[in-house]
Image (cartoon, helix red, strand yellow):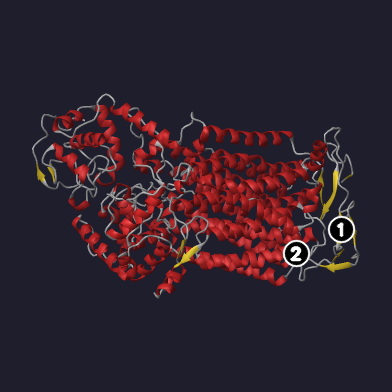
Amino acid sequence: MSEHVANASGVEAGGGAVMERFSYDDRIVRMFVGATILWGVVAMLVGVIVALQLAVPQLLTKSGFGWLSLIVNTEWISFGRLRPLHTNAAIFAFAGNAIFAAIYYSTQRLCRARMFSDVLSQLHFWGWQAIIVSAALTLPLGITQGKEYAELEWPIDLAIAVVWVGFFGVNFFGTLIKRRERHMYVALWFYIATIVTVAMLHVFNNLTLPLVIAGAIKGQAVTGADIAKSWPVYAGVQDAFMQWWYGHNAVAFFLTTPFLGLMYYFLPKAAEKPVYSYRLSIVHFWSLVFMYIWAGPHHLHYTALPSWASTLGMLFSLMLWMPSWGGMINGLLTLRGAWNKVASDPILKFFVVGITFYGMSTFEGPMLSIKSVNALSHYTDWTIAHVHGGALGWNGFMTFGMLYWLAPRLFQTPLWSRRMMSTHFWLGTIGILLYVLSIYTAGLTQGLMWRAFDESGRLAYPDFVETVTALVPMYWVRVVGGSMYLVGMILCGVNIGMTWLKRPKVYEVAEHEAPALARVYVDPPRPGSRLGANVGVGHKADVFIQGWWHRVWERRPLKFSLFVLVAVAIASLFEIIPTFLIRSNVPTIASVKPYTPLELAGRDIYIAEGCYNCHSQMVRPIWAETKRYGEYSKPGEFVYDHPFQWGSRRIGPDLARVGGKQSHDWQVRHLEDPRQLIPQSLMPGYPHLLEQDLRFESIQARVDAMAMLGVPYSSAVREGGAEKAAREQAERIATELVAQGGYPDMQGKKVVALVAYLQRLGTDIHAPAEPAAEATTQAEAGEHEAKEEKR
Amino acid sequence: MTVAPGSGPKGESLLDHEYDGIREYDNPTPGWWHAIFLGSVLFSVGYIAWYHWSPMSYSIWDKWNRAQVAEYERIFGEIGDLEPDEATIVKMMGDSRMMAIAQGTFIGNCAPCHAKDGGGINGVNLTDEQYKNVKQVTDIFGVITAGAANGAMPAWQNTISQNERVILAAYVASLRGTTPAAPRAPEGEAIAPWPGAKQGSE
C-alpha cells in the first residue's frame, strides 16, 4: 500500500535525496481521543438535563413531583445558564477535541512529518482542556457575554486566542513547512481554512470592553465576578450582525470544514478506496470557503437588520447548497464498489449515516434561509432540530467512526467489542431519529400555532403558554432519543476504555523514512488544450479548467493559506463595511434614551441568567406577531444594546414590548415562581433574585463603561451620580411594588433592577420626545439630538 | 497527470497523487451539480433585480402595512371607528363576533393577571359585583387605557388600538356575573348594574 508514487511527473531537483528517519507522535492523538470521549459524555449528559428541564416543569404543580423543582429552579443549573454549557461543551469540547485528534493524526501522515513541536502539542492539549474547565465553572455562575456560542468572557477568550493561534496554529503550520510530502492533500486545505477563519471570527466577534479596564481608567475598584465582566464594542443591529457572522461561520468552520477534512482522510482509509473526484474537491472547497461567510444574516430575517443584508444571507445560503453537497457527493461516491463492506463494517456505517445527515442538513439549511420559510421556522424548535441533525448526525457520527477506526491503531490491540460498536451505531441512529422527528414536529406545531387566526380574525392561540404546552409530549420523546444517544456515547467510552486497558506495555513506535523536500521543484509541464477551438481564449480556458495552477498552489502552504484568508476576509468585508457605515441602516429615534443606571444593572442580570436562551427581544413585521406582541421592532431602538439580546428561540414569549404590560408585583411574583401565576409555565423560578442584594457600588463602573462605548450618559450620571440615581429608582419601584400589594423591602434586591429593566423594554418608542430625566439633562439631550439631526 | 487509466469502477483514471496511501480519481464534477450551482447563481441575480429594484416588488414592511389595513377592514370595516361611550360599549356587548375578537385580546394581554375566565390571579376578579376603579361602564375603557392602582393595572393606550379597547371594555363588562373556576375574593365597592344589558349575556 505504501509504495510512494507521488510526484511521478514533477521533478524534485537541487539535491536533497538524503533520507530522514522520523516517527509520528501518537501519544497526543491518544490524549485528544480520551478528551473527546470524556467531554462527549459530559456534553450529552448536560443535553439530557436541559431537555428534562423543558419536559418536567408542568409536573411541578402536581403533588409528589415537588422534588423536581431542584432540577428546574436551582440557580446554578437553571436552563438559561446550563444551555450555554451544553452548546459550548458539544461544540468546543466534544467536537473540538475530536477535530484535534483527527488533525494531529492525519496531518503528520499526510505531511510525512512529526508535529512541528511536541511541546506545542502538549500546550495545545492542556490549554484547551483548561479552557473547557473554566467554561464549565464560569457559565453556571452566570459569567457570560450573553452572545450565543460566544458566551465565554474575555479572560477565557484571550486564552482561546493564544491556544488556537499560538499553540495549535503555529504547530500546524510549522508541520506544513517541514513536511516531506510535496503537495497538500484536500484534508489539509480544510484544516487550513478552519484554523485561519476560526481565528478571524473569534477575534472580531469578541472585541469587548472589560469592566476592569473601564474601572482602572476611572479609578474604581472592580471585584469578584465583575473582574470577568465585559460588553461588546458593538451595539444593536451591528452587534447582531457580527454575532451571526460569527455564529453561522462557527458552524461552517468549526463543525463543517474540519469534519470534511476528517472525512477526506478517514473515509478513504476505512473504505480502502480512492477518493471519487479530485476536481470536485477543488471546486467545492473554494466555493464553500468563499460563500459560507456571506450567509450569516439568514439568522436575522425579518428582524431590524437592513433588508439588503437579509437578501445576501438568503441568496448566498442558496448558492451554498451545491458547494456543501460537493463534500457529500465526494464522500458517498468514494464508497462505490464498497457498499458490501458498508453492510458489514460499523465504522463505515457511522460514516455513511454521518455524511447522509450532512447532506440533509446542508439541504435544509438553504431551505430554512428562504425568507418566507424562515418566517415560519425562526424562533421555533425547527432550528433546534436542524442543528441536532447536524451535530448528532454529522459531527457525532463522523467522530464515532473515526474513534473506532483509530482505537486499534492507537492502542495497538484489536477493538474490545465489535458487537458493542454495532449496538452503539443502532442506539445512536434511533436516538437521532427520535430526537429530530419529535423536535421537527414541535417546531412546526408551534410555528403554525403562533400564526393561526380563527374565522373571527383573532389569534387562534392568544395565550402563549398554550403553544408551549402543546410541545411537552414531544419534549419527552426528545428526552428518550437524547438518552439513547448518550447511552451510545457511554458504550463508546467503555469500549475504547477497555481497548486501552488491553494495550501493550510499551507502544511500538514505527520508524519511517523519507527524503526531505528538495529545495527546488519543477512542476510537470502545463497541459495543452484538448479543444479543436480556433480562438485563443477557448484554448486558454480549457488549459485553465484542467487545474494545473491549483496543483502549484497545493505545494505552497503559506500562499494557499493567504488565499483562503483573502477569500474569507473579502467576503466578510463586503458585508461588514456597509453594515457599519451606511447610516440609513439604523435610523435614529429621538425618544430612545440610554438605560438608567438601575436598568443597566438589571440588564446585566438578564444576561447573566441567560434569559436570551428562551426569550427573544425582536417583534418581526409579521401580522400575527404584532397582533400578539405589539408594534414591530425598529433598528433605532437597540442603539444602546451592548450586547444585543434579540435571541434565537422563543420557549417563552417575546419581550421586546414587555415594558408596562404587567405590574411590578406580577413581574416579581412571576420571577419568584412562574407557576404561581401561570401553572403550565416551563420557566425556571428565580427565587434567589428576591434574596440576593444588588451591588449598587458596582453600578458606577458599569455606566462609565457604557459611556466609554459611546452611550450618551449625562455628566451628572457619569461623574459619580450613577449609584445614587440607581438607589432612588430602586426606592421608587419598591414603593410602587408595595402600593400594588407586592412584597415589602425589595429596594436592595437584584429583582428590583431586573424589573426596572423589563418595565423599560420597548417603551421608549412611545415616550414623549423630551429626554428621560434619569439619563440626560435637558441641555445635553438637545445637543445629542442636534448631532443626530446633522447625520 | 493520470496513471492507471480505466482502473475505476466505471473506467475512470487514477491520478498520480498519493498521500499516506490515499489515491484520487480524475473524475469530472457531475453535470447536475454544475447545473444547480449555476441555477442558484442566476436565481440570485434575478431575485435581487426583482426584490430590490423592481417597482412591482414590496418589502416585508409594505406587506405588514397591507395586512394591517386588510385586517382592520375585515374586523371593523362595517362598524367604522368606535367611540368609548356608554351606548357603543353596551351595543358591543351584544355583538358576538366582536366579543370573540375581544376575548382573544383579553387572553393574550389580560389573562396573565386576571385569569382567562376573569376570575383574577393577582389582578382583581372581573366577574363579581364589586369594582375598585369603575363606577360606570365607560370607566372600564378608562382603566384599560390609562391604567390604575399605581401601575398594578398597566396602561394599554400605546399597545392596543382604540377600537380594540372599546370592544375589550365591553368584553370585560360582559364578564360580570359569570362563574369563574377559581374566583378571587371581591374587592372594592358594589356598583349599579350596567345600563340596559342583560348581565353575563355572553
Question: Looking at the image, how many numbered discs can be counted on the residues?
Answer: 2
Above or below, A309 relative to A13? above
* Place of residue A83 in the rendered image (x, y in percent of width and height, measured from the top left): 48, 56
Q: Which residue is pictured at 70% across the width and 66% down the height?
A: A171
Alpha-carbon distance for marks 1 and 2? 19 Å
In the rendered image, the quadrant that contains the N terminus of chain A is bottom right
Residue topped by disc 2 = A175
Q: Image check: A692 left or right of A277?
A: left
- As drawn, the residue found furthest toward the front would be A790
* Place of residue A671 in the rendered image (x, y in percent of width and height, measured from the top left): 33, 56
Q: Image check: A447 left or right of A397?
A: left
As rendered, which of A659 and A89 lies closer to the eye? A659
* 10 Å crowding of disc 2: few (<14), some (14-19), many (20+): many
* Place of residue A250 in the rendered image (x, y in percent of width and height, measured from the top left): 58, 53
As rendered, which of A343 and A621 lies closer to the eye? A621
Q: Image check: A505 left or right of B172?
A: right
* Place of residue A136 in the rendered image (x, y in percent of width and height, measured from the top left): 51, 64
Which is nearer the N-term, disc 1 or disc 2?
2
Above or below, A769 relative to A176? above
Above or below, A620 relative to A80? above
Identify which amino acid the numbered label 1 is placed on.
Answer: Tyr
Indicate the secondary structure of the residue bearing disc 1.
Answer: strand
Q: In the rendered structure, the residue with mark 2 lies on which chain?
A: A
Q: Which residue is pictured at 85% across the width and 46% down the height?
A: B15
Identify which amino acid the numbered label 2 is placed on.
Answer: Thr
Residue topped by disc 1 = A521
Q: Residue A542 sits in which quadrant?
A: top right
